[in-house]
Image (cartoon, rainbow, N blue to C red):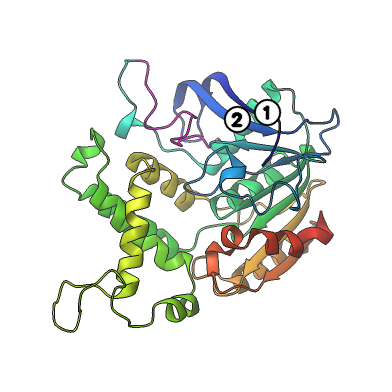
Amino acid sequence: MLDSVVDHDVRLGEVALSGGTTLPDVVARVTIYGQPRDDGANVVFAPHALTGSSRIAEWWGGLVGPGALFEDAHWCIVGINTLGGCYGSTGPPAIAPDGRKWGPRFPIVTVEDMVDVQRAALQRLGIERLGVVIGGSLGGFQALSWARRYGEFVEHAIVVAAHDHLRAQAIAQNGLAREAIRLDPNFHGGWYEEQPAAGLKLARAIATLTYKSEDLFERRFANRPDRAGGNPKLVLDDRFDVDGYLAYQGVRFAARMDANTYRILTRAMDLFDLRGAEGGPERTRLTFVGVTGDQLFFADHIRAVCERWADAGWDAAFRLMHSDHGHDAFLAEARELGDLIRDRV
């Protein structure tokens, strides 16, 4: 377990968004493990992926904590629930000035908006510099945006299983997931009392098909009937084992995720694009990590992104993580990830 854990609700007041609107009464939920040094050299900031929270140790325990790459005995580890989230920061479930939840009225936010809020929250807490910013997937988008936007404050940005933009196929998959939620009869245009569980389950299933590798699915499930029972050879609606796995993941997901938040954060991913912004490098070192079998952010594409940033003058290095887990490897095999990048930290 990590010691010295402190949660902060940092109130930032009105925040101007990149889309031209302003968001009043913004709160950022910040979790800090350990103690920061005055120069910030021991501060590790880990922006989370699509469904994470500020409590990094609860979802990235293999990378932070005793025996891991980032131990709180030496490092101060910081997490922030992203703007638009549902775990403490201002997002669709938060109460708007009129006393109602923001719900579907919550404005579109970008990765750049998220990073601006994170920077402001850290400054309010007296953290001016970061030794490392590390994130996977959407968290990787944020890590790279930190390097581009606030490079003078960041020593090293580690971009795991993420490009510098979202490719068309991933945008399409996000759109299908949002549509699955929107078409749930319980969605009610975003004004639901209870989560639209059927839509969330389907959205999670669509996403999970890109989170795991084809090799892992074949090894685990092949074409076997669902271990929970049923015979798909005789009954059309009976499941195969892989169907049962997706259903199980959907139930767990629907119990913890807010539907409007999912829609907001996936749109932020769609809008992310730093192509053409590589020039004029700051002092930040960059490490890009690709994963074999990643069907969302292909390793060869990440290598090409790394080369493009290196060609623009950045100190950028690429690491390839070998894993059957595909995109989810940065979570499922976090200790292996730590070993892979240890020489860069």
Main secondary structure found in the magenta portion: loop
Name the foreground residue: 47 vs 24.
47
Question: Residue at 77% across / 37% down in the picture?
Answer: 153
Q: Position of residue 178 (x, y in %)?
A: 32, 51
Nearer the observer, disc 1 or disc 2? Answer: 2
Query: Within the image, what quadrant is residue 202 found in?
Result: bottom left
Of labels 1 and 2, earlier in sequence is: 2
203 is within the stretch colored magenta: no
Q: Which residue is mark 2?
A: 30
Q: The residue under label 2 is which amino acid type?
A: Val
Q: Is residue 86 magenta?
A: yes
Quarter of the image where one finds residue 165: bottom right
Q: For residue 11, which numbered disc appears in the image? A: none
Q: How many marks?
A: 2
Q: Which residues are magenta?
A: 82-97
Q: Is residue 202 left or right of residue 222?
A: left
In the image: residue 270, left or right of residue 344: left
Q: Where is residue 44 drawn, in percent x and y?
A: 73, 42
- Give the x, y percent position of residue 102: 34, 27
| Crowd tier of the residue under label 2, counting other residues whose Cα lies within 10 Å: few below 14, some 14–19, many 20 or above | many
Residue 335 visible at all: yes
Q: Are marks 1 and 2 in contact (CB under 8 Å)?
A: yes
The residue lying at 44 percent from left, 28 percent from top is: 21
User: Which amino acid, mark 1?
Assistant: Leu
In the image, is residue 113 above or below residue 332? above
Quadrant location, the N terminus? top right
Residue 9 lies left or right of residue 171; in this view the side is right
Residue occupying image coordinates x 80% and y 39%: 73
292 vs 279: above or below = below
| Local SS, label 1 | helix
User: Residue under circle 1?
Assistant: 122
